[in-house]
């Protein structure tokens, strides 16, 4: 359990494909031009990435094939890229406090609401699927303690500088996951104790991180073990959330209470861990099959090469 | 493994903390008395216990339960406290002495 399985090239070794200059330009334009114009202006950007990003294209094709069961054409791949770009600019609007340009509906069962608003704190697991930002905006409205997002400030340098520019308070409340020592988990522990909702993405494992191998869309993938182990150790309720982009300016938040308490009994720890990760993967798979263009892991996500599944 | 790290005798404080570690982390191939007080707890070098950040959380929670000492990330001493069994014992008992 301690050693990470030899996986595909880790996503965290990829360089982010954008420059600070481009990001600044895009953010400025997004806020200035308005959403409708931006959605049109995104096409040349999408086309640029489609033309130059061979690996992104391949990853999108592999994924769409698995999710839809059909070999995707150029059109589907472009649509996938455009959905990603749209969710990105919508993130800019949300961070800038302009949620009104979007039509966001939320279905939050009572049990999930209760956990999200409890002074006991809880963990919110998301994925690189749709928009985590809409979950934050819709789900956390009435919480007293600030939401704390766990993100790797080294890998997500772009995301971080975006956050710092648009929502400095949220940025200051992020918990930096690039630290490998005890500080990261102690920070999370303190945030939960303080009653915060601590958000993290539970669908990507770093190469050097404890991981669990599960079935996902007909193949095998590595999911991080950390979120489940943290939930068990902290005895914190787990909420899972999907901020689905439904086209146009519509989003749907699906937030649900996964478990009020995740149990990892000593004697059957490895099996219990796998069961939780597998259950999460199955839930994610449901969403992914319904809304295939929301999947934003543009790298070799599966352990076996395409076509072997 | 033991050739690169000299195993020094544990003090009573270190011995009871070593017990706590083995218990909290459910270490199967390590005995409490076999943990060298100066060996690194984290990392991959020779002689290290090879613990990771989740282990750190379990240790912090176990220490909080047993000694009532909360290890906080903002404390400058926390990172160095996790360097070895000796450092951890000194940190915890130092905090207890202050209390």
Image: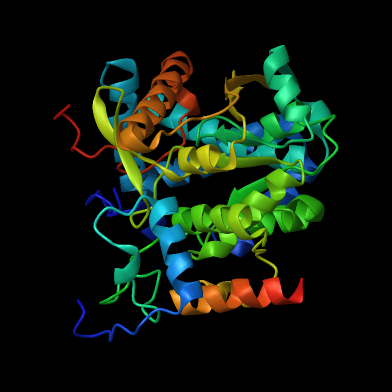
Residue at 61% across, 71% down:
B92
- Which quadrant of the structure image shows residue A185? bottom right
- Above or below residue B68? Residue A63 is above
Q: Nearer the viewer, residue A154 or B91?
A: B91
Residue A74: image location, x then y, percent: 34, 28
Q: Residue most toward the left?
A: A308
Percent coordinates x, y for residue B16 in the rendering: 47, 66
Residue farthest to the front?
Answer: B12
Question: Would residue A142 be visible to someone looking at this image?
Answer: yes
User: Looking at the image, what colour scheme do you see?
Assistant: rainbow
Quarter containing the C terminus of chain A: top left
Residue at position x 62%, y 74% from top?
Answer: B93
Residue A27 vs residue B65, the one in the foreground: B65
Q: Residue at x 47, y 42 (%)?
A: A229
Q: Position of residue A270 (x, y in %)?
A: 31, 37
**Which quadrant of the structure image shows residue A143?**
top right
Number of callouts: 0
Evaluate whether residue B83 shows in this view.
no
**Closest to the observer, A212 or A26:** A212
Q: Is residue B39 left or right of residue A102?
A: left
Residue A179 percent across, percent down from the top left: 53, 64
Q: Residue at x 82, y 35 (%)?
A: A98
């Amino acid at each position: 359990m301690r050693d990470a399985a030899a996986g595909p090239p880790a996503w965290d070794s990829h360089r982010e494909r954008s420059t600070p200059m481009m990001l600044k330009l895009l953010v400025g334009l997004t806020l200035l031009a308005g959403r409708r114009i931006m959605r049109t202006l995104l096409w040349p950007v999408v086309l640029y990435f489609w033309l130059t990003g061979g690996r992104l294209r391949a990853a999108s094709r592999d994924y769409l094939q698995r999710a839809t069961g059909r070999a995707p054409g150029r059109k589907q791949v472009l649509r996938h890229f455009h959905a990603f770009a749209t969710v990105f600019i919508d993130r800019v609007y949300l961070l800038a406090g302009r949620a009104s340009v979007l039509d966001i509906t939320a279905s939050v069962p009572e049990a999930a609401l209760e956990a999200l608003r409890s002074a006991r704190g809880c963990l919110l697991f998301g994925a690189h699927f749709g928009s985590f930002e809409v979950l934050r905006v819709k789900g956390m409205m009435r919480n007293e303690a600030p939401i704390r997002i766990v993100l790797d400030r080294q890998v997500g340098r772009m995301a971080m500088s975006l956050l710092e520019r648009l929502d400095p308070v949220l940025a200051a409340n992020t918990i930096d996951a690039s630290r490998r020592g005890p500080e990261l988990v102690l920070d999370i522990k303190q945030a939960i104790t303080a009653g915060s909702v601590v958000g993290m993405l539970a669908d990507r494992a770093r190469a050097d991180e404890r991981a669990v191998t599960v079935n996902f869309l007909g193949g095998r993938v590595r999911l991080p073990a950390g979120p489940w182990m943290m939930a068990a150790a902290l005895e914190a309720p787990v909420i899972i959330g999907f901020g689905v982009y439904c086209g146009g300016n519509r989003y749907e938040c699906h937030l649900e209470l996964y478990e009020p308490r995740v149990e990892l009994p000593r004697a059957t720890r490895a099996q219990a861990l796998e069961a939780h990760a597998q259950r999460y993967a199955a839930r994610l798979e449901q969403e992914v099959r319904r809304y295939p263009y929301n999947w934003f892991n543009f790298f070799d996500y599966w352990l076996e090469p395409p076509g072997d599944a | 493994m033991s050739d690169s790290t000299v195993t020094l005798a544990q003090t009573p404080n270190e011995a009871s903390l070593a017990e706590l570690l083995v218990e909290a982390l459910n270490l199967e191939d390590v005995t409490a008395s076999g943990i060298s007080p100066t060996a690194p707890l984290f990392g991959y070098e020779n002689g290290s216990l090879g613990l990771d950040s989740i282990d750190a959380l379990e240790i912090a929670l176990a220490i909080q339960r047993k000694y009532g000492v909360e290890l906080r990330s903002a404390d400058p001493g926390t990172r160095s406290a996790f360097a070895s069994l000796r450092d951890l014992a000194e940190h915890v008992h130092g905090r207890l002495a202050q209390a």
